[in-house]
Amino acid sequence: MAVPTREELQHSLLCGHIIELPPEPSKIVRIFISSTFGDSVAERNTLLQKAYPTLQQWCQRHGLDFQVVDMRWGVRSEATVDHRIGELCLREIRTCQKISAGPNFVCFLGQRYGYRPLTPEIEEKEFEILRKCAKECKLDDSLLLEWYKKDDNAVPPRYTLQPITTKFEHYHDVDPANQELREKQSSQWMDIFQKLVDFLRKAAEKAFQNELITEETRYKYFMSVTESEIRAAVDIDDVNQHCVCFMRTLNNVKEADPAAHMYRDSDEHGKPKEEEQALLEKVRNQFIPEHYNFTNVHSYDLEWMKGGIDPSEPEHKRYLENFCVQFVTDIKRLVEGAVVAKSKWKYVYDSPLFVEIAHQTNFCLAKCTSFCGREDILNDITQYVVNNHNKAGHKPAVVFGVSGSGKTSIMAIVARDAHKNLGKNCVSVLRFLGTSSRSTSILHVLGSVCQQICRTYDISTPTGNIWENYNDLVAWIPSLLQQVSQDKSGRPLLIILDSLDQLSESHSPYGCNWLPKSCPPNVSIIVSTLPNEHSILENLLQSMVDDNNYFQVRPLQEGAGNEIFQTWMTGINRQVTSAQKNIFKDAFSRCRQPLFLKLAFDQARLWKSYTPIGNLNLGDSVRSAIGLLYERLEKQHGKILVSHALGYITAARNGLTEAELDDVLSIDDEVLDDVYQYWSPPNPDVVRIPPLLWARLKYDLQEYLVNRHANGKTVMALYHRQFIETAKDRYLKGAAKAARHQILAEFFLGKWSQGTIKPIHLSQRKESYHADRKVSYQPIKYRKVFNLRKLEELPYHLLYADNDEQLIENGIGNFKLLDAVIRGLSVQDFLEDINLMISEKQGTDLCEELVLIRGAIRLARPTLEYVGGVNYECVALEILGRLLQFADKYPRCIGILVAGAEDWCDRHRHSLLVPQRGCFPAPGGPLRTTLIGHQDDILDMTVNQDKLLLVTASRDYTVRVWNLETDEVIHTLQAHSASGDLDAVYCVAITDNGKWLVSGAADDTLIVWSLRTGEIIHKLPESHCYYYLHAPLATVHNSSMAVSVDGVRISVHDIVDGKRMLTLKGHTNAVCGLHVTPDDKYIVSASDDTTVKVWSLDTGDLLHDITQHTDDITSLTVSANYAISGSRDKTALVIDVATGNIVHKLDNQHPVSSVCVSPDEKCLATGSGQEMMLWNLKSGELQHTCAGHDGTIDCVCISYDSKYVVSGARDDIMVVWETETGKLVHTLEGQQAIVSHLALAKYLVVSASLKSPYIKLWNITPEQAKEKRQTFPDKSGIVDVTTSCQYVVYRSDNGCDIKVWDIDDREDKYTLVGHTAEVKCLVITHDNKYVLSGSEDKSVILWHIKSGEGMHIFPEQPAAIQHLNLNRNDTHFISACKDNNITLWSMREKSLKAVTLSSRPVTSVALTNSSVMIYGTRDGIICQYNPKNGKTHTMKGHKSTIQCLVLSDDSRMLASSAMDPYIIIWNVDKRKKLKTISVGSTDIQCDVNHLAFSGDNRFLSSAASDKQVKLYRVQDGCLVTTQYVYSNLTSMKMKYYCIIGGTRIGQLLVLKIHYVENEGDECSDDDISQFGSRMFPHTQRNSSCCTVL
């Protein structure tokens, strides 16, 4: 058969062909060490102490695991009880050959041939031949028949050597009281063993002479375990790429030396055994040279020393060193050869996608191998798929059944037969969920499924990082399936997702909102789930009401179960007796689940025909059968070993690799104390678990362990949920659970690695050791690759180890780990970790800190997940910018975390602007998060009746449904079309029953959607020609109808059948408001024809026509009894909807832009200009006039309990008021665009803007209202900050007064009252003592900041003061008036010194230390006026209005910015350009409005309207670094190497410059500690870092 090409094999994988695959390139170096033990102790110890650690670190740096399988190391006598050691060794060799990358076998041959065991099983025919030949030799076979029993359950029958303990029960009894019995029985067994060996060898020799058996058969009775291993090792291709042999000869062995017998086979007189020596020489001199190249064989000749190999002797010491070096060299050589060559099939696995598909294919094959029966349900599923595949809108098939019912095997068969049932060109995309790390998170599952589809159908993927954006990915899937449906080649697509219940909680997958509820033609989906897990089936039944697409997997019929049992038995050449068969039938009749059948079979296959019936028990349920299995393993292998090993595998988050489990067991003192009860560790300096013990347990457990891919490793896990749950109940309860997680945490911390000694006391032997455990190192990164296993597992185990201090120090309070989890895994992974911690730590002091940390990362998430992946500088800066202010209050966790972030920044090898205080929106404040998904402005939004769902409509033509509990998108609905610039989805409404969603768009369609499934129910044509002005939409409260506009008419549609019920005619212009009263009797509408109309919902009749408004109606709302309309005519009308009478006409001072009624009908809120008016609805009296905005209020809403009213305005903020008192409770700043839409979900405010795609969620609970304000309440943008960071000075809301905000106390310290008109500018003196203010009242006032006193009023100027500036020495200041007069004043003398008049409008001023007056103008000219000589000079370079001028401290340089894309640095004295810095495109208006020089003139910082602070190097004008600060700045200055300023949202910004002269690549701690001075010979790591002086 021809070898498939790369293209052919990859095509088969992509299309879902279930075929045998070539092996995946391994990431494990697993070497079997073969030798006799007693004579190789010195060599083994040298390897253990020197070679293995070296190779382990070397492999880790190459992304490989290093394992050594030394089956004779640390073996205790019970390992030989069942005579299986030889079989286990050969099995381990085959495993090494299968999975090891490069070397897999190293043999060490001395002068001992080694242990020659009894043959554990002999076929009946061969056994009888041996007996016959024994009789010819006059041998008594009674002992043979006593120890070998015939097993008729084997086909053909065979004789089995009985375990030693069947005759000698104290053979491995560890009870000290039975020591004498144990020694006696051990001696007895050795005598029997020798007699049996002699009998079988003589009989075999005779049988061979009589030509009754072959030489190969004869030889197995003579061969040692070591030789059998050597022979098995060469049974592969390319032996010399995998095997190495070391041979040692000791010359002149002294027979009299008591140690001589350990180094060669000798009799009781110390004489060499000739037979063993002959067999050994044959291996050394014939077999090895025939199979090994000379480069792979190393021989050493040594002189005998007293006691044998003596590491203290120089010759032997050199030998051991050379041996160790050669071992390491050979292993590296073979690994490197394998890494270069990898595998001839390397190309199959050239991406994570193909690795995942291959894993799923192999898993499917394994499930299909043992499958029998189930034709009924298979036919039902197949018929459903085949019959509906070409139909539009058919539902996904749902397969469900209890755990163990065989769902996964059924799904595997469906996948295997897909090409037979749907055609050879069918594409089958298969995922067995939870079987790999890429099939656990729904985001990863959907990503890999979509990638496979795109690759197969040659479909382009959207731009951007869609694979990491759950909302965008889910939104794109319907479009992708539609493209598949329209595939020109007509290739059918079948998507199979097994075990939805195995998905992790990430992105809330159990609601199945990600699953398309209908399929386009040529696309089919099959999913399976448990019926009662996570409410998955319930959710599916609610969203897909169709009995035909649900398939229940029922229990097996008894006859089918018996047939399957017999088929499986025949397949392994075994059978059971009739009595045993009855036991099986009886058990299966009580539990007819396939998993129970599998367990019963696996138990029955071990039964011998002579096993007593009374010892046979299969249980009566899956759980009891698993319990019996675990109980049997405990008896056979020891309860402590089994309970701990299975406990660790179960406790691990994603399973454990074999190497990890080996290490974990080796640091578990309880296990080692049990292992070494009567056998001391072979090396007192290194104590580990003997590899043989796990190998034996794994052999008995192999049917129930599966290999999975996790974080680039192959891990072991229990293969079924029932096994996991039983193990949890049995091995992970109470203290045992914490203990298992503690050891796992210590392992992934690397606590006992790198030579760290872990003392141990062996209680039974009363021995203590200060020993190295030789466990693998666990850095956060291996060079530049994250240690994903550590990142996934460590936080989980630290949590469940139930030690808060450890959790803080090494987990959530450890910045390095937090940073690595976010960058190495994802923000979502971190949030899942901390959500788990919060749920486990509820009610503890730690929980409060965890909530704040989670809040910080939630707020930072949009930045961290910015397109292109997580910027490695972001995490530390976000932590500092959001949590620094909490560090003192919460030192236990947040304080440590913040300190770690600071340390990271200090050591970072790139330049940064490091927050020195809480500069960014902080957690614990009102802002909860930002919802990101829409690509254009938000035009409408609404929340559903139970306040759990938010629906938004956008100019990007989509409707999004959000879950307000998880902040994630449930549906992204795309059906409206776009044809022009004004096209968009303009309005949305949800029915009260939560079933339907209605959207209206400029494409003249009204769409009714199923809110549960996201499917289109109806698409109704209407005229939406006025949507660009108004787009009102409503649903009736009984959820049966939608009310919308059709031109100037109003349409009423039946939601269920889509029919138009009513058309209401009467308005003569665009309808601007539309509501249905709560009792569903009336429709109330408002129009640009200035009328409000009340209609009958039953008949469509016009009942009332209200014409009292004299200008445009801006807003409309209804309550149980009233309709309220607001108008530009400055009135709000309260209308009785039943009578049409005007109850109140409420006069406002400004045009009314928004209205809202409280649920209890007591309060009416109207937005009138910049004021919020609160009215008593019944009396019509004005209760409160609330001032807090600087822009028109466009939207208002009132909380469900009528306690709060929230207003949103064009000043970009929201204000929360108490309805009863009118008191301002919150000012919500951060929307950073006009607030056009508000909605309330209990105490959660949802805000959006017509000028932004972002949605903000705010918490306004009463508890939040009590929190002290974190930000200064400036709305003017006229702000200055003391460089001591003690005070912020800003203009008050009334415009005339000035506030002094105490930064530490977070409150206004003083109000500076003195100006009689609006303050236009502020400047604080450089000594931080005084502030100058300039006003439209033409005055400049000098204030003392700390006392709040007015110190001096400077003489009135001819016009309003527009600009102020001080020289660096605070001796003079300059003012510029609206009439362009520029005045120089003396601060000391409080007198005018000079005046000049600009011929151009002045836009900015600066003053040198020598009192040269510099000003910028609207036409881009900069002028210098020298009062000493009266001369004015111009500096030309800008082409638009000068925005900012700033001087260096020494006045030698000037920086200027204008509305062009440049910053210019000037030489002041020469008036020449030094540098021109480009800050943007020439096509885009630039508005750099703040600049500042560092004190030493090395740096220039800038701030513009892009919310970024940039740092430039003055010398060459190069950009050094940029920091996004979430808000535009209102002021900026620099002191030493700190940038200080205020932001538009009231944050004090303090950024320290961390400057690195020669920036380098990111480097891990592992790199630094490992390479140290070689990489960084200087303490500053070849960098120059600036810090605050």
Image (cartoon, rainbow, N blue to C red):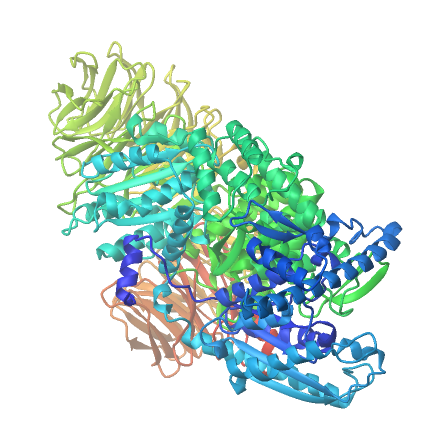
Question: At which x and y percent is residue 699?
Answer: 58, 54
Question: Considering depth in this image, is 404 or 660 the residue closer to the camera?
Answer: 404
In the depicted structure, whether residue 1224 falls above or below residue 188: above
Question: At which x and y percent is residue 688?
Answer: 70, 63
Q: Quadrant of the C terminus?
A: bottom right
Question: Considering depth in this image, is 1482 or 92 the residue closer to the camera?
Answer: 92
Question: At which x and y percent is residue 1552?
Answer: 53, 66
In the depicted structure, whether residue 856 falls above or below residue 237: above
Question: Considering depth in this image, is 852 or 1454 the residue closer to the camera?
Answer: 852
Question: Considering depth in this image, is 390 or 162 the residue closer to the camera?
Answer: 162
Q: Is residue 1364 left or right of residue 578?
A: left
Query: Can residue 783 be seen?
Result: yes
In the depicted structure, whether residue 82 falls above or below residue 1375: above
Query: Can residue 764 be seen?
Result: no
Q: Is residue 1261 left or right of residue 22?
A: right
Question: At which x and y percent is residue 1282?
Answer: 54, 60
Q: What residue appears at the point 45 percent right and 26 percent down from the top-left corner?
A: 1219
Q: Quadrant of the N terminus?
A: bottom left
